[in-house]
Image (spheres, rainbow, N blue to C red):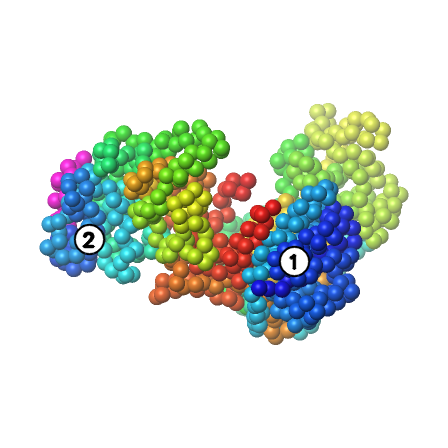
Amino acid sequence: MTEFKKIEENLKTEATRLLKEGLVTVVLAYGKGFDENHPMPYAAKTIADVENIVFNEYCNYNMARYLVRYPQGTKIAIAVKAADSRAVIQLIQEEKVKRENLVILGIPVQGMKNPKTGEIIDSKTTCGMYNPVLYDLLLGEEVHGAKSASPYDVLAEYEKMDKEARWEFWKKEFDKCIRCYACRKACPMCYCDPCFIDQSKPKWADKAPQSPGNMMYHLTRFHHLAGRCIDCGECSRACPVDIPLYLFHKKVAKECEEMFNQAAGMSIEDKPVLVDFRVEDSDKILE
Amino acid sequence: MSRIGVFVCHCGLNIAKTVRVSELAEFAATLPDVVVARDYKFMCSTPGQEMIQHDIKKYNLDRVIVTACSPLMHENTFRKVIENAGLNQYLLTIVNIREQVSWVTSDIEEGTAKSKALLNGAVYRARLLAPLTSRVIDVNPDVMVIGAGIAGIQAALELANTGKKVYLVEKNSTIGGHMAQFDKTFPTLDCSACILTPKMDNVLQHKNISMLTYCEVTEVKGYVGNFDITIKQKARYVDHSKCNACLACTEKCPGKGISEWDESLVKRKAIYIPFPQAVPQKPIIDKNSCTYFLKGKCRLCEKVCEQKAIDFEQQDSFINVKVGAVIVATGYDLMDTKPLVQYGYGKYPGVYNALEVERLFNSAGPTAGKVTQRDGKEPQSIAILHCIGSRDKNYHEHCSRVCCMYSLKFAHLFKEKTSADVYQFYIDMRAAGKGYEEFYNRLLEENVKFIRGKGARVTQSTEEPGRLIVEAEDTITSKFMKLPVDMVVLSPAIVPRADYKDIARLFNLSTDKQGFFMERHPKIAPLSTMSEGIFIAGVCQGPKDIPDTVAQALGAAAEALTIVVKDKMELEATTAMVNPASCCGCQNCVRVCPYGAPAFNYEKRVSEINEALCKGCGLCASVCPSSAIIARHFTNEQVLAEMEGLMEF
């Protein structure tokens, strides 16, 4: 694997070139935070901004989150790791961004770390891929030969629980929720404005951080992300009270993949799976 | 504050038997905003209707709830009732306590409790209802008929005779359908061609019928009164506008294909007309058996054609047609009996299916009407096996309805044309049509042997090569029997067309377990479907004989006429709309709508709904993640209130 420092250099070189040649008006990448372990999402808009770009093992934000914030037609360069590239694909499928307006800077990488725990992020909380699925430029050598685990292996224990145990599990987890909505903010696929939970007519759930409202918020969000979650794990890392949101997302993604033979964000030719009818679709969902 | 009247119907004992109706009315009176609650034996009767209208005036009601049967039955009745009393028709709520309560329980406690819960929900929802205005749309006066068998032909002629323009779409290169394959029809034994071909010719000559043969529907857009249908004209490689039907081409053609029309019993040319009375009487080239298409040279037909009608470059083309109503009459297939290996169809040359036998009898068929087997010999003994794959839990549970009668017809024709012994193996004889029992009695006297027992197996005789053994249990004598015969005729289950799913999807039709198209209601709307403006006729709805098929076709024509006879029609006001401020631009609505009503406005980045196309099904509203879509009459607030009311119990 190409070293982080080298990737950072390549990122800076490409960002400078793209801005200089006027091919893009903004480069979405990572910038300095308050220390090494806490880089920040960063949008470089001028050549002078480029020197602030960093890339290290803590740059795990999914920059696809920021794509929908720019007006349609904005030419954007975006730095993406494997899961991030899937988010870009999913957004293209949903026509939130156009492929021709993007320059995708792919970063093949392994050994990303969670700044909070120092733990290596792998298939446990992300999709477990190392190489971007879609890119225009690759900023390092593709990772090959790395141990690849199924992103669904982590579900083994969860799936041992019966229906009642799962209900209890999530009730307990959601009771911790303080409704900061960091999960929603971090998620590249959560682009609704307004979010259903912020609406008052009808008021779908209580806004206070209490059990029934928390349950309604999270279960509905899970539901809205079914077949769309690209498993970057950012929601779980953003969560200040450590709710293992990735478990639910992975479980739904697994069922969806088994049922419809399509994983989210793997090809721009795909259609969003849950709103696409195919005659050969499984009827299992109706049983 | 609204003023609600609740009217509980007994429906005789239909409801009152398992719901305590007076208790339900007393309960209703205690609910918020309910100013009057009554129960009555038949709310749909004139006194019942007058009671509602009287109360609307007396109590100044602004909402009416009728707890009765399914809204499919009487919603329109009660809408008119309240409208005539000065209320907007959408301020009516029907609570279905018959189909969804009294008919599905025998426990009066349960029935009463569920009725109360449903009613409570309805009161909560009714308080939030808003008056709505129906939409008025223009109606296209033309009709399309899909399938030109006897059903399609009859419906098309009937409509055309009223002066309406009809597009008759047929997949094959000729109209006529299965009936044109038959020799005789039961029970009168009149010549099938003699009664069908005049109608086929009428279609050809009729100035109001546009006959689209060798065509398939590929896309259906629009809605009742304004369907926009795309039809694929499959390439015929013969320009029919130039062809003068001299058929010199078919004489010279060296190509050999399997004759679909003769049920694969013989070969036909690669350029051909299926049968002598085909309409249109003009050939097509079958690409799969044409020497030129297969090997790159030949073009003999082109050389002999004086009209220069042969066009090897012809491509599939697409025709766009706008109509106000559609009749689907796509007919049937026979079940493929090859998988039922016990009967040896496809394995033993002596085993035939019913349609093959129809062709053997037909003077225009492969044997010119002589009954000879595949080996050229006349059979000396013939067994006809009923119910092959039908009335059989392993394959198709339904009765195919016509097999008993055509099997009798076969027996008669075999007796007439050969000296063979004829045996019928039947489960029981179903002869429930006009003149059918008489026909059965006639056959009993024609020295046909009836064996009450289903044919269980057909094997090859080891002693006499080429002969077949039919094994069955004669259930009258309770004896197992083995009968040697020369020929076995299977009467296979009648099943929907192989492509029924495509048709169902194109026209949003639902199908029953077997794949036959579902009627809106088996008794009171047998030719309508759940898709407004789409009607069904003939065997695509379920197995039936020619008289029933023709009757249905006439009925469907009348139904279609009720739509296209008017220039304008009123549509339900229950459509969806988008609140652009909440739309997140995900386009889920655009993707799920079966009617193409929502479209994405790329400039404003929001979805917009074309109300003329919207059927009010609510799919878009349910997949909208930011609840930007409002389904009128079923708004989120209304539905949530109803659920709240339901869940109080």
For residue B509, above or below residue A7: below
In this view, the residue in front, B36 or A70, is B36
Q: In the rendered view, does B335 fall on the left or right side of B9?
A: left
Q: Tell me residue B331's x, y (percent).
A: 65, 53
In this view, the residue in front, B426 or A39, is A39
In this view, the residue in front, A158 or B192, is A158
Q: Which amino acid does label 2 sit on?
A: Ala
Residue in the image at 76% along x and 50% along y: B16
The magenta segment? A1-14
Using the image, tell me which numbered label, if any, was put on residue A13: none
Q: Which of the chains bears the disc numbered 2?
A: A
Q: Main secondary structure of the magenta part?
A: helix
Q: Which of the chains bears the disc numbered 1?
A: B
Check disc 1 and report the residue beneath it: B94
Quarter holding the N terminus of chain B? bottom right
As helix, strand or loop, the secondary structure at mark 1 comes to strand
Check disc 2 and report the residue beneath it: A43
Residue in the image at 81% along x and 42% along y: B429
Q: Tell me residue B284's x, y (percent).
A: 55, 58
Callout 1 and callout 2 share a chain: no
Residue in the image at 68% along x and 52% along y: B27
Q: In the rendered view, does B254 fall on the left or right side of B53?
A: left
Q: Tell me residue B133's x, y (percent).
A: 57, 70
- Contact flag, marks 1 and 2 (Cβ < 8 Å): no
Q: Which amino acid does label 1 sit on?
A: Ile
Residue in the image at 41% along x and 56% along y: A199
Q: Crowdedness of circle 2 by 10 Å Cα count: few (<14), some, many (20+)?
A: many
